[in-house]
Image: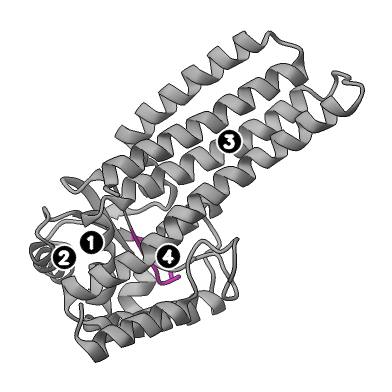
Amino acid sequence: MGGTARTAILMGVLTGLLLVVGFIAGYLTGAPISYTLAIFLCIAIAMNLGIYWYADRWVLRLYKAKIVSEAEEPELHRTVERLASSARIPKPRVAIIPTDTPNAFATGRNPSHSVVAVTQGAMRLLNKDELEGVLGHELGHVKNRDMLINTMAAIIGAVITYVMYFTLFAGGGRRRDGGAGILAIVALIMIPFCAMLVRLSISRGREFEADRDGASISRKPLALASALRSLQSAVRNRPMQKGNPSTSHMFIVNPFAKVSMRGLFSTHPPTEERIRRLEEMAKTGRF
């Protein structure tokens, strides 16, 4: 499925979740259902438009990432330019994130308007080949148009959670007798959970794809495997202290996890499995 189709599906699913929140908000607060649905539909439309055009700015501002010029980081720019040429995409802008936690992510609405961001910690920790592997992975996301989907999911999931708490607070004084009121509250609590599952289902599978594309772009699958091992170990010992966990799936490894997370609620597939697949690619030469 192409990036455009996945973007449309994500917009539709999460917009639908917002409308469900609007329905429950009307039920709990006593406002006319048609009125709350109209409000939440307008919110959904405004959010979709705003996220499409400005999501990358929100993420970069959240992590205080600074766009750097070629004069400031000539080697990093040369590496990104060479990898972008290999991937046959326009060269993204390059940003540095001022944190010691080693990591990286890509954002932007399409390959022509994309940004690759690397932390200061990653610049210090990784050697040249490992950094190329990481940048190749991020350019894989750019090539597959994953970055808009990842950024949209992060923002809409966070907004749904905030709206949930506001609605519960606003509807707290309205009595609802019987099981219907309890059902509405339970449903409202489940909305962010459903949004999270949608986000996780998208991000986990795309990481394997970006690893494979990153290995193909950089031609260095073992360097990417080594980088993932180093990044996971560093994050375990020094997780990121600032930021928003709803954006964790945007990074090459979860920057907030103190331990390796497995199962349904992990934003990333197991690092060990990612490394195993990369080592298999190097062994077979199929990348």
Query: Which amino acid type is shown beneath numbered disc 3?
Result: Ile
Compare marks 4 and 1 and give the one earlier in the sequence: 4
Secondary structure beneath label 2: helix
Q: Which residue is mark 2?
A: 80
Amino acid carrying mark 2 in the image: Val
The residue at which mark 1 appears reads as: 139
Q: Secondary structure at mark 4?
A: loop
The reply to whether dot 1 and dot 3 touch (C-beta < 8 Å) is no
Viewer-nearest residue: 251 or 198: 198
Q: CA distance from mark 4 to mark 2?
A: 20 Å
> In x, y percent, where is residue 2?
26, 48
Q: Nearer the viewer, mark 4 or mark 2?
A: 2
Q: CA distance from mark 2 to mark 1?
A: 8 Å
Q: Crowding near pointer 2: few (<14 within 10 Å), some, many (20+)?
A: many
Q: Which residues are magenta?
A: 97-105
Tell me, yes or no, whether the two marked residues, 2 and 1, touch with CB atoms within 8 Å. yes
Q: Is residue 268 above or below residue 280?
A: above
Q: Which residue is mark 4?
A: 99
Q: Dot 4 surroundings within 10 Å: few (below 14), some, or many (20 or more)? A: some
Element under label 3?
Answer: helix
In the image, residue 248 lies in the stretch drawn in magenta? no
Q: CA distance from mark 1 to mark 3?
A: 29 Å
- Extreme-right residue of the structure: 177
Identified at 49% across, 58% down, the residue is 248
Foreground: 69 or 218? 218
Q: What kind of residue is marked 4?
A: Thr
Rendered residue at 23%/88% (across/down): 284
Q: Main secondary structure of the magenta part?
A: loop
